C-alpha cells in the first residue's frame, strides 16, 4: 500500500511538472493496473534485452516495431507493476534537423539510459538512421519535423521479485564470455572480422561478445511508458531551415487539427510559400508536387491513405486499443556480468559500435566497388628524370605508382644485378598526403606514373609491390593482408639486354589474395605492383584487369572492355594508358575516364612508331584478349 501511494504521489508530481512546462499536456488520475491480460502487453517488452545500436525508438512506417528488442532476460509475466498515466503532448513549433546528430538527439529523448561511452553512437546500425545519414550527411538534405506523443500507461519491472525469473541461458552465456584486452581486440581488425569472423584472431576473443550482443542486446529494458507517437517530416531548403530556426515563432502549429501537419494547406503556405487555390483538387496536386513528405506513427491505428481526412483527435483516441513502448528506461547488461568482465563489456561494445554503426567509413565499405572507384580521381604524369604526381584540391592520395626505366646503353651491357626496370609505390602516409614523387639526377631515366586520389582520409587502399633484387630469388609474389583482396595489379618482365618495347606485361587476377611470378631468371628484370581493397566491397570478384598493347603504332588508338562496347555493363571503371617512341625520347601517360565505353591513347607525331600499353578495369569476361581499334 505504501509503495502504491508513493508511486501515486510521484507520478502525480510528474504530471504537474509536465503540465507546467507543456500546457498542451493533459494528465489523468493514477491507479494500479491488475488485469493480467493487459500485463501481457507490457511483459512482451519489459525484461527483454535491447540493442542500443540496432534499436530505433522513433516512429518509422517501414518497421513493424522497434528493431532493438532481443531475447528475454527476465520473465516478467508476474513481476510487473503498471500504473495508468494518460498524457498527450503536441509540438507547437517546427523543429529542424540539419545533420545526423539532430536525429540522434531526437531519438535519445525517448531513451533513459545509464552511462554510455561518448564514442558509441546509439541507433546508428538501424535502417532509419542509415537512411537519414545518407540524406543528411551525403546528400545534404534538411527536414522540418513535428512530433505528437500520447502516453497511456507506465510499466516497470520489480527487480526484487524477478531474481528467480532470470533466463538461465543468459547466465550461462555470460559465463562463457572471454575476458578481453585491447591488444587482443586490435589483432582482430574490423575489416578482418567482416571478412572472416572465425579466423584465429577473432574466434575466441571478440566474436563471442558480438554474438552475445546479437542475441541479448546491449541493455535491459526495466521500464517503459506505453502509448503512441507520430513523426512528421518534410524536406526543406537550407534557406528555409535557417529561417525556421531564427523566426521559430512564425511557425506556430499548436492549433492545427491535422495529424499529418504538412497536409494542412495553411502550414504548406507558410513553409513553401504556396498560393492557396480555392479548388481542393489543385491544393492536392500542389501537395503531391512538393518535396519528400512523411508521416510515421508508432502506436494507435494506421488508416493508410485516409490520413488526409483524419484528425489528430482520431489518432489519439485509437491509442487506447493499440499502445506500444515509446519511452524506454534501460540499464547496461554489464550490471549482470561478473566484475572481471565489465571492462571487457565496454571494449566489446565499442568494437560492436565501430563494426556496425553507420558512419562515412562503414557506409563506404559496404558500397559497390565500382561506385567507389567512380568517386575518386586518377592522376597521371610522365617525362624524363624526376616526376611528381599531385592530387587536385579536396582529394588525398590513396594508392599509385611511378614506373622508371634507365635507357643507358652502358647499364644495358654491364654484367651486374642493377635492374633497369623499377617501380616506386605511392603509399598513403597520412590525412594530408596529396602527392607522390620520384627524384633522380639521371637524365637517362624515363618515367611515367598513375595515382588514385580520394575525398576521405579513411579510404586507404593497401599498396603492395616487389621487384627483382637478388640472383638467389627464383620467384616473386605480392600478397594482400588478411581481409583484403587485389582490385588492380600487374606483373612485368624485361630481359636486361632487350629494349623497353619488348617488355612483357600481364594483369593480376582481381579477387585473388596474391599475384606471383614463377621461375624468375637472372637475365631479366621483374616487377609486381597492385593495390588491395577490403573484401566487404560488393562485386569485387566480378571484375578483371585487361591489358592491351601494340608496337609500331602510328595513329590514335582506342581500347574497350568489349569488342562492340554496346552492353551497359561493359564500362571502364578504372584505367590508364602509356606510350613511348622507339628512341625513348617521348613518353606519355593519361588516365581513362571512369564509366566510359572506351579509352583513347593519342599519338602526337604520326611519323614515328610508338609502343602503346593500356590497363582497363572491366567486368569479368573470361580474360578474352582485346585489340586496339584505330581512330
Image (spheres, grey):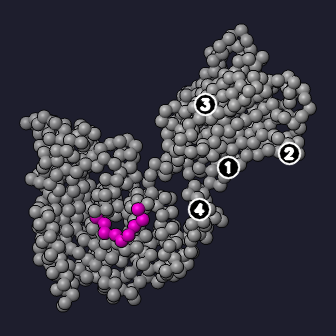
Crowd band around label 3 with a 10 angstrom C-alpha radius: few (<14), some (14–19), many (20+)? many
Q: Which mark is residue 186?
A: 4
Which mark is nearer the camera, 2 or 3? 3
Q: Is residue 546 visible?
A: no
What is the distance, in whole Å, between disc 1 and disc 2 at their CAs? 20 Å
Magenta stretch secondary structure, dominant: loop
How many marks the image carries: the answer is: 4
Give me the C-alpha separation between circle 1 and circle 4: 18 Å
SS category of the residue bearing label 4: helix
Q: Which residues are magenta?
A: 110-118
Q: CA distance from mark 2 to mark 3?
A: 32 Å
Residue 503, percent across and down?
A: 79, 28
Residue at the image position 49 percent from the left and 58 percent from the top: 354
* SS for dot 1: loop
Residue wearing tag 3: 389
Magenta-span inclusion, residue 116:
yes
For marks 4 and 3, give the CA distance. Answer: 34 Å
Q: Quick one: label 1 or label 2, which is nearer the N terminus?
A: 2
The answer to which of marks 1 and 4 sits earlier in the sequence is 4
- Contact? badges 2 and 3 (CB < 8 Å): no
Please name the residue shown 39% across and 88% down the image. Answer: 164
Position of residue 464 measured from the top left corner of the image (x, y, whole percent): 69, 44
Label 3 SS = strand
Query: Looking at the rendering, which quadrant does residue 417 occupy?
Result: top right
Kindly identify which numbered label has been placed on residue 372: none
Q: Label 1, on which residue?
A: 480
Q: Determine whether, in the image, residue 256 is placed left or right of residue 176.
A: left
Residue at x 13%, y 45% (from the top left corner): 250
Amino acid at each position: 500500500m505504501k509503495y502504491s501511494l508513493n508511486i501515486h504521489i510521484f507520478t502525480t508530481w510528474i504530471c504537474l511538472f509536465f503540465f507546467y512546462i507543456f500546457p498542451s499536456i493533459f494528465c489523468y488520475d493514477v491507479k494500479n493496473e491488475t488485469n493480467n491480460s493487459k500485463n501481457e502487453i507490457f511483459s512482451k517488452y519489459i525484461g527483454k534485452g535491447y540493442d542500443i545500436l540496432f534499436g530505433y525508438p522513433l516512429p518509422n512506417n517501414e518497421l513493424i516495431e522497434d528493431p532493438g528488442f532481443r531475447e528475454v532476460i527476465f520473465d516478467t509475466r508476474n513481476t510487473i507493476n503498471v500504473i495508468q498515466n494518460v498524457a498527450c503532448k503536441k509540438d507547437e513549433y517546427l523543429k529542424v534537423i540539419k545533420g545526423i546528430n539532430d536525429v540522434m538527439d531526437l531519438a535519445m529523448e525517448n531513451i533513459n539510459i545509464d552511462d554510455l561511452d561518448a564514442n558509441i553512437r546509439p541507433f546508428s546500425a538501424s535502417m532509419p538512421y542509415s537512411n537519414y545519414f545518407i540524406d543528411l550527411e551525403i546528400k545534404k538534405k534538411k527536414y522540418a519535423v513535428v512530433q505528437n506523443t500520447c502516453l497511456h500507461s507506465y510499466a516497470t519491472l520489480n527487480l526484487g521479485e524477478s531474481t528467480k525469473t532470470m533466463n538461465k541461458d543468459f547466465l550461462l552465456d555470460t559465463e562463457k564470455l572471454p575476458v578481453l584486452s585491447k591488444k587482443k581486440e586490435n589483432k582482430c581488425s574490423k575489416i578482418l572480422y567482416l571478412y572472416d569472423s572465425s579466423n584465429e584472431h577473432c574466434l575466441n576473443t571478440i566474436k563471442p561478445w558480438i554474438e552475445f550482443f546479437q542475441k541479448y542486446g546491449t541493455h535491459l529494458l526495466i521500464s517503459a511508458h506505453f502509448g503512441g507517437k507520430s513523426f512528421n517530416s518534410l524536406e526543406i531548403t537550407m534557406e528555409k531551415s535557417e529561417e525556421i530556426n531564427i523566426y521559430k515563432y512564425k511557425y506556430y502549429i499548436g492549433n492545427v487539427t491535422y495529424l499529418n501537419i504538412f497536409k494542412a494547406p495553411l502550414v504548406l503556405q507558410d513553409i513553401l510559400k504556396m498560393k492557396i487555390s480555392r479548388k481542393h483538387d489543385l491544393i492536392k496536386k500542389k501537395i503531391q508536387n512538393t518535396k519528400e513528405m512523411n508521416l510515421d506513427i508508432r502506436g494507435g491505428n494506421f488508416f493508410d491513405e485516409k490520413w488526409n481526412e483524419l484528425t489528430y483527435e482520431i489518432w489519439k483516441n485509437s491509442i487506447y486499443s493499440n499502445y506500444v513502448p515509446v519511452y524506454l528506461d534501460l540499464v547496461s547488461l554489464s550490471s549482470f556480468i561478473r566484475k572481471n568482465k565489465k571492462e571487457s563489456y565496454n571494449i566489446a561494445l565499442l568494437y560492436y559500435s565501430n563494426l556496425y554503426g553507420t558512419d562515412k567509413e562503414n557506409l563506404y565499405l559496404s558500397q559497390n566497388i565500382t561506385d567507389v572507384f567512380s568517386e575518386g580521381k586518377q592522376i597521371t604524369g610522365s617525362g624524363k628524370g624526376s616526376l611528381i604526381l599531385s592530387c587536385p584540391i579536396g582529394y588525398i592520395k590513396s594508392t599509385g605508382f611511378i614506373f622508371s626505366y634507365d635507357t643507358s646503353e652502358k647499364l644495358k651491357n654491364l654484367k651486374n644485378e642493377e635492374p633497369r626496370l623499377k617501380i616506386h609505390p605511392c603509399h598513403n602516409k597520412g590525412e594530408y598526403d596529396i602527392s607522390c614523387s620520384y627524384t633522380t639526377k639521371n637524365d637517362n631515366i624515363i618515367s611515367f606514373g598513375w595515382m588514385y586520389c580520394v575525398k576521405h582520409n579513411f579510404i586507404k587502399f593497401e599498396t603492395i609491390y616487389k621487384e627483382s633484387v637478388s640472383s638467389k630469388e627464383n620467384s616473386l609474389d605480392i600478397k594482400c593482408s588478411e581481409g583484403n583482396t587485389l582490385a588492380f595489379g600487374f606483373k612485368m618482365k624485361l630481359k636486361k639486354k632487350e629494349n623497353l618495347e619488348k617488355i612483357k606485361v600481364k594483369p593480376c587476377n582481381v579477387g585473388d589474395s596474391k599475384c606471383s611470378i614463377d621461375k624468375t631468371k637472372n637475365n631479366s628484370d621483374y616487377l609486381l605492383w597492385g593495390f588491395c581493397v577490403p573484401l566487404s566491397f560488393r562485386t569485387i570478384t566480378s571484375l578483371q584487369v585487361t591489358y592491351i598493347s601494340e608496337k609500331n603504332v602510328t595513329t590514335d588508338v582506342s581500347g574497350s572492355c568489349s569488342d562492340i562496347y554496346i552492353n551497359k555493363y561493359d564500362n571502364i571503371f578504372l584505367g590508364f594508358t602509356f606510350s613511348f617512341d622507339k628512341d625513348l625520347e617521348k613518353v606519355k601517360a593519361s588516365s581513362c575516364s571512369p564509366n566510359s565505353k572506351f579509352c583513347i591513347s593519342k599519338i602526337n607525331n604520326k611519323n614515328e612508331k610508338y609502343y602503346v600499353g593500356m590497363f582497363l578495369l572491366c567486368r569479368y569476361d573470361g580474360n578474352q584478349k582485346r585489340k586496339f581499334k584505330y581512330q
